[in-house]
Amino acid sequence: MKTQTVIVTGASTGIGRAVAALFLQHGHRVIINSANAENLAATYAELGHHDRLVQVAGDISNKATGKLLVDTAVARFGTVDVLINNAGVFEPKSFLDVDEEHLDRFLDTNLKGTYFTSQSAIRQMLQQGEGAIINIGTVLVDHAIGGFPATAPISSKGAIHALTRQLAAEFGKNNIRVNCIAPGIIRSPLQAKTGVTDADSLAGLHLVDRIGETEDVAQLALYLAGSSFITGEVINLDGGHVAGHHIG
């Protein structure tokens, strides 16, 4: 795979950080983003490779942030080859307790953030004649879990799955590929934020009887970035979560 310029949103911790680190290890140029400027600066310092790494702080729910990421990538490295829409928020809440403000939080960050950042990136990719977008969804779109009410974030993630296929169809002839990774339970700071104190206790939800690691997601993202013949796919990276269940 040729050296590429890669934008990773939500890259200060968890999946996004692991993705950025792996692309850097493989010699690519990376722009990392987070709404938390302090965390982002710490990650920037830890990742190193500062000749190939740029940090851009900003809330992805603000349309201007996506444009700034693209403009920065072009100004620094000349291209936007890969956009990884990882930034997102997730919080369980009972459906009947969800008000408009709560719902808008997920629509603004998860859906609109992905939508408008992709719009800025695709404008640049059309000029280049190629590009790849990798969205991050969730297996919970296709496999709901009773006792874990999260209609607001999952609705926004479901929209990302649909957006993936629509963009793949609209821009396939322009050599722009769009795919989505739908992770299962991944060991990351997100677990603690959703009230899960022992992520490994959820291992039984997966046929392989373990939870995923952020590196699992990063490896798939790296593969999709280099593949020229995969587009319009929502790939479950879930240890068999959707495929089936153990008895006992």
Image (tube, rainbow, N blue to C red):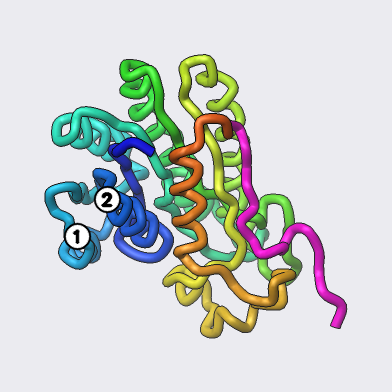
Q: Residue at x 56, y 34 (%)?
A: 164
Q: Are marks 1 and 2 in contact (CB under 8 Å)?
A: yes
Circle 2 packing at 10 Å, graded few (<14), some (14-19), many (20+), is many
Identify whether 226 is placed above or below 91: above
Residue 32 is labelled as 2
Q: Residue beneath label 1, please?
A: 44
Q: Residue at x 78, y 58 (%)?
A: 243
The quarter of the image holding the N terminus is top left
Q: Residue at x 39, y 25 (%)?
A: 122
Mark 1 falls on what kind of element? helix
Q: Which region is colored magenta? A: 231-248
Q: Is residue 89 left or right of residue 207?
A: left
Identify whether 70 is placed above or below 222: above
Identify whether 32 is placed above or below 176: below
Percent x, y of residue 35: 28, 54
The quarter of the image holding the C terminus is bottom right
Q: Is residue 94 left or right of residue 1?
A: right
Majority secondary structure of magenta residues: loop
Callout 2 amino acid? Ile
Callout 1 amino acid? Tyr
Magenta stretch: includes residue 232: yes
